[in-house]
Image (cartoon, rainbow, N blue to C red):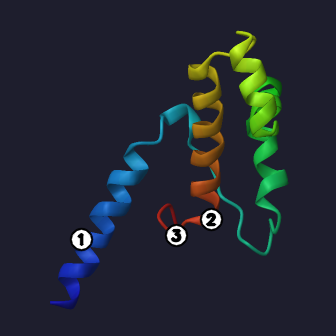
Amino acid sequence: MSSDWAKLAQEKRDSLNALIPQEWKLGSIPSAEEQRDVTEYIRQFLSDRELEITETDAVGIVNQTTTGAWSAVEVMKAFCHRAALAHQLVSDSIR
């Protein structure tokens, strides 16, 4: 019975990892000892525009999307990209 939960857990991890677009997958993942600050580490994988979007507060995002400077899709993709990177760095699912 204990292997049943382990198999289900692995299947769930695999299904979550399969949802990450290939271009967002990290080639290698540093250990927690090597990279203590994942927030700073993630920045290297994001475009300048993604950084601007994901580091803007909610009021700023509303202003930018309301004026049409940023599209809702662009904002959503930037946050999803950042979240996918963070997931890979802090999750045991990739290791």
Tell me if mark 3 has few (under 14), some (14-19) or many (20+) residues whose alpha carbon lies within 10 angstroms of its own. few
Q: Above or below — where is 64 with respect to 51?
A: above
Q: Which mark is residue 92?
A: 3
Quadrant of the drawing holding the N terminus? bottom left
Q: Earlier in the sequence, mark 1 or mark 3?
A: 1
Amino acid, disc 2:
Val
Q: Secondary structure at mark 2?
A: helix
Q: Nearer the viewer, residue 64 or 39?
A: 64
Q: Position of residue 31 (x, y in %)?
A: 71, 69
Amino acid, disc 3:
Asp
Q: Which mark is residue 90?
A: 2
Q: CA distance from mark 1 to mark 2?
A: 20 Å
Q: Secondary structure at mark 3?
A: loop
Please state if 37 lies on the left or on the right of 67 as rendered: right
**Residue at mark 1:** 8
Q: CA distance from mark 1 to mark 3?
A: 15 Å
Please state if 21 lies on the left or on the right of 39 as rendered: left
Q: CA distance from mark 2 to mark 3?
A: 7 Å
Q: Nearer the viewer, residue 70 or 21?
A: 70
Q: Position of residue 63 (x, y in %)?
A: 78, 22
Q: Above or below — where is 81 with respect to 39?
A: above
C-beta proximity under 8 Å, tags 2 and 3: no
C-beta proximity under 8 Å, tags 1 and 3: no
Amino acid, disc 1:
Leu
Residue at the top extreme of this rendering: 68
Residue at the left extreme of this rendering: 1
Residue at 74% in and 11% down: 67
Q: Quadrant of residue 38?
A: bottom right
